[in-house]
Amino acid sequence: MQVPAPFEYERAESVEHAIGLLERLGSEARLVAGGHSLIPMMRLRLANPEYIIDINDLADELGYIRVEGDHLHIGAMTRHQHLLDSDELASHFPMFRDAEKVIADPVVRNRGTIGGSLCQADPSEDLSAVCSTLDAVCVIRGSGGERVVSMHDFHQGPYETAVGDAEILTEVRIPIRPNGSSAYNKVERRAGDWAVVSAGAAVWMDGNTITDGRVGLAAVGPNTTTIDAARDLLQGATPSEELYAEVGAVCSANCDPDTDMRGSAEYKKHLASELTKRSLRTAVARATGQEA
Ligand SMILES: Cc1cc2nc3c(=O)[nH]c(=O)nc-3n(C[C@H](O)[C@H](O)[C@H](O)COP(=O)(O)OP(=O)(O)OC[C@H]3O[C@@H](n4cnc5c(N)ncnc54)[C@H](O)[C@@H]3O)c2cc1C
């Protein structure tokens, strides 16, 4: 039986209370949200925090999806199931629903949170790839106030983020831009498994011209990543199968997956190309109202 090492348990009643507990208990304290990444790691003794600070009572305070001005705001305690069910989220960014349909299973989706997903910083994390593709920013709060960090700067290596010892991720903000859409595709070994590779694409159109486009990949390197060279090719381009193939090839060339139990590096590079093509094709079809 896999049993975590002994730990003390605290329950935070507000964001300020959680920050106060983190400050008082020090670097051996860890927040627990859905627990679907932290608890398995504790059971395997890959994580051995002395203190667990449960933030599930913040589900009301930090569990929301709402539009404010030209940004969509998602609270860090918003659970996968809420993200999957939200028509408002799907109408702005359909790739969220694409991704949530293939994340884990209902048990995990009922508890796991977007904040936990981003803070886990697993290189295969689907929501990190989605947020990177959509150019999201992360709001981090500590006793000194709030700071806003881009997705690029948020992930600092596998399982490492910009969140400090006495800080908490409170919100993800995504810019809403007109005439855009998005899509996400993933290959997994079995239903609900982590990605072998996944690719998200977002495009913004003016008539039949792509004015801007972004591609984000998961499971192809130390962190989920966007591919700058893909953006360069997409800006100002006319959608075509040739364009999607060219962008797919560039994404494949610009990622560096490892060979592991999920597949060879060569196979993963092939997937990076193929899934990029599929996501671009769907994103453009959605943006131009042509999705079947
Ligand atoms: C069987 C299984 C299958 C899965 N399949 C997939 C999959 O296909 N794709 C996928 O992307 N994910 C998958 N997951 C992971 C799942 O999405 C988790 O819910 C997610 O990784 C972590 O969210 P959580 O809320 O459970 O985080 P927790 O486990 O509670 O926390 C994870 C880490 O984040 C920190 N943390 C949590 N919230 C905050 C916050 N607000 N501020 C600062 N730090 C915070 C914690 O201290 C901890 O270090 C799977 C998990 C399981 C168990």
Image: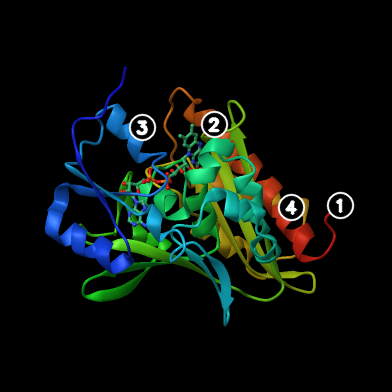
Image coordinates of residue 2 in percent, x first then y, are: 30, 21
| Mark 3 sits near ligand 1, with its Cβ under 8 Å away | yes
Q: Give the quarter of the figure containing the N terminus.
A: top left
As drawn, the label of residue 292 is 1
As drawn, the label of residue 40 is 3
The amino acid pointed to by label 3 is Pro
- Nearer to us of marks 2 and 3 is 3
Image coordinates of residue 206 in percent, x first then y, are: 74, 75
| Mark 1 residue crowding within 10 angstroms, few (<14) / some (14–19) / many (20+) | few
Distance between mark 1 and mark 2 Cα atoms: 27 Å
Picture quadrant where residue 186 is located: top right
Callout 2: helix, strand or loop? loop
Residue located farthest toward the bottom when viewing the structure as drawn: 69
| Mark 1 sits near ligand 1, with its Cβ under 8 Å away | no
Residue that label 2 marks: 193
Q: Is residue 42 above or below residue 285?
A: above
Q: In terms of sequence position, does the residue under pointer 4 or pointer 2 come before the other?
A: 2
The amino acid pointed to by label 4 is Arg
Q: In terms of sequence position, does the residue under pointer 3 or pointer 1 come before the other?
A: 3
Image coordinates of residue 179 in percent, x first then y, are: 72, 73
- Residue at 51% in and 58% down: 131
Picture quadrant where residue 40 is located: top left
Is residue 103 visible in the rendered structure shown here?
A: yes
- Nearer to us of marks 3 and 4 is 3
The amino acid pointed to by label 2 is Asp
Depth check: 27 or 252 in front? 27
- Nearer to us of marks 4 and 2 is 2
Residue that label 4 marks: 281
* Marks 4 & 2, CB-CB < 8 Å contact: no
Q: In terms of sequence position, does the residue under pointer 3 or pointer 4 come before the other?
A: 3
- Nearer to us of marks 1 and 4 is 1
| Mark 4 sits near ligand 1, with its Cβ under 8 Å away | no
